[in-house]
Amino acid sequence: MVEPLVEPLLAVDTVSRRFGGLLAVDGASLSARPARITALIGPNGAGKTTLFALISGFLKPSGGRICYDGADVTGEPPHRLARRGIARTFQIVQPFAGLSVRDNILVGAHLRHRARAEALAVAERVGHDVGLHDRLDRPANTLTVAGRKRLELARALATEPRLLLLDEVLAGLNPSEIRDVVPVIRALAARGIAVLMIEHVMQAVMSLAADVFVLAGGRIIAEGGPAAIATNPAVVEAYLGHGAATKVGGARG
Amino acid sequence: MKALLPIAGVVAVLAAVPLVVHSNVVLNFLVVTLMIALVGQGWNMLGGYGGQYSFGHAAFFGTGAYTTAILQVHYGVNAWIGFAAGIAAGAAAGAIVGALAFRAGLRSSYFALVTLAVAEVLRILASVAPITGAGVGLLLKLDVRAQSFQFQSRTAFYFVILALLAVSLVITRLLEQSRFGVWLIAVRENEDAAMALGVDTFAVKLGAMTLSAAITAAAGCFYVQYFLFVDSGIAYGTWISIEALLTPIIGGVGTVFGALLGALVVKSLGEGAKLVAGDVPGLDLMIYGAVLIAVIRFAPRGLVGTVADAHGRIRRRFATAPAATGEAVRG
């Protein structure tokens, strides 16, 4: 099936980030398109979360350019990027622990709705969308891990983003919880949102993502459709170690 | 409007007090207590709702007090205009300190230390500068007329400070219901998460600090009109910084009535101790310390917070019985 290629909403162009002597992200380029799910995968320590922090403005790149919606947004602070329509979740969930679930979502909803009644209505609807409707009045710190992940997602969605960065929203969930969340993410892309997700749960990546970028040692070592990525020798080596591709290939052959 | 009903009720009760009580001692006690509540209410705006604990709110109390005193003593400016100027000067001081501290990214104890240092520097400057009366202080001319913001009766002063406090309570309540307030609380709870949701955390903290300083400065201006005297130890002394944070912490940080309740409790205990033990120097401070330790140990969310928690627990116990079983099924 040939899909019509839409202009990328996000274009990361040879971006680097150095921490002292460590080059955490080394000339990485990737793009994300509206109404598609793009996955960013890679072994631990590859620099995925750092790359997310660069895109969402929490870190400034040491080099390279980040374009969003045709504008150069390199180095803009997070709140301004959020206003432009970039939302993110955190790998380590960051709830407003002392507030209720509803008030957590309300913070995000207020970005586009000044009036309290409107923002509350948005919070209610988003809470419903992610399946938190029965827990809206509970304190956020009473939620389970799965609940907190949903809350991360809900808050980000309440800002009505056009680009959504999901940092391991499925990590720590059991298979039945993953089955619950996957359709939620798919629905977001169907709504036209460009979804860029970091994910270790490969099954989910394979079933969700249209495009996959593989980051290892701070560099993008492969990109393409999920099926091509799974058999790419460079990717197998990055995950399993040098020489693994031939061993795996040999065993298969 | 419904949200303001509790405030109307509390203010009405306080307004009825002078109808029953005519003792000057009691009225004086209440005037000072409400003034401290106003100081605490200012602190609560930044510390309670924004999570930025200032140890130097004396900087704003004193700036308000000195501004109106200097304008009246040295320049013959009308007291009410001086009052407005004092509030504006306090707000400006808050904005300047806030801009510097927050731009530098100071958080928690670093922010507390910088505010403490600012207040101390101002105290030392005021104790040597001629314009502040240096070590002698400034004495306002007695001129008992309403247009000079001076009243014969304590009752009149009581109504003035009650009105100021009422305004601050309403501002606090409206803040809670506003987008700015929601963002401010988000900053308190988790700054990174707030940023990711589009909150300009610098602007929000700066706004809160400006408002907070303005309210505390209003109390400083009132102090000058009430006692007609100010010196560096009163205006910029540590005592007022301590009372500013003590009252809302004891009453309940980040609540509308926390500072008022805290001021009533703290001041009653202080006066009560004086009645029992005589005027032992430092006794009130020892009592404050003991109460503070007790509150932090047993009621970390303050008196209002503890009552609200208990209420919430009871309500949830009744409300979530069916929801809890639903959770078990899903799990």
Image (spheres, rainbow, N blue to C red):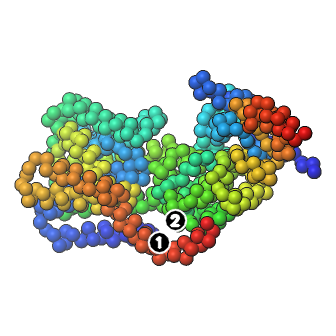
Tell me residue B45's x, y (percent).
Answer: 39, 52
User: Which quadrant of the figure contains the C terminus of chain A?
Assistant: top right
Q: Left or right: B3 with respect to A162?
A: left
Q: Left or right: B199 with respect to B295?
A: right
Q: Residue at x 73, y 28 (%)?
A: A27
Q: Residue at x 46, y 73 (%)?
A: B317
Q: Is residue B321 above or below residue B26?
A: below
Tell me residue B61's x, y (percent).
Answer: 28, 45
- Res A126 seen here: yes
**Could you say which disc has been placed on residue A138 in the image?**
2
Measured in 3D between alpha carbons, the distance from the residue under mark 1 to the one under mark 2, in whole angstroms, is 9 Å
Residue most toward the top?
A: A21
Kind of element beneath mark 2: loop
Amino acid type at mark 1:
Arg
**Could you say which disc has been placed on residue A184 in the image?**
none
Q: Is residue A85 above or below residue B11?
A: above
Residue most toward the front?
A: A251
Q: Depth check: A120 or B230 in front? A: A120
Tell me residue A115's x, y (percent).
Answer: 57, 60
Which chain is disc 2 placed on?
Answer: A
Q: Residue at x 62, y 71 (%)?
A: B329
**Could you say which disc has been placed on residue B316 in the image?**
1
Q: Residues within 10 Å of mark 2 (few under 14, many from 20)?
A: some
Kind of element beneath mark 1: helix
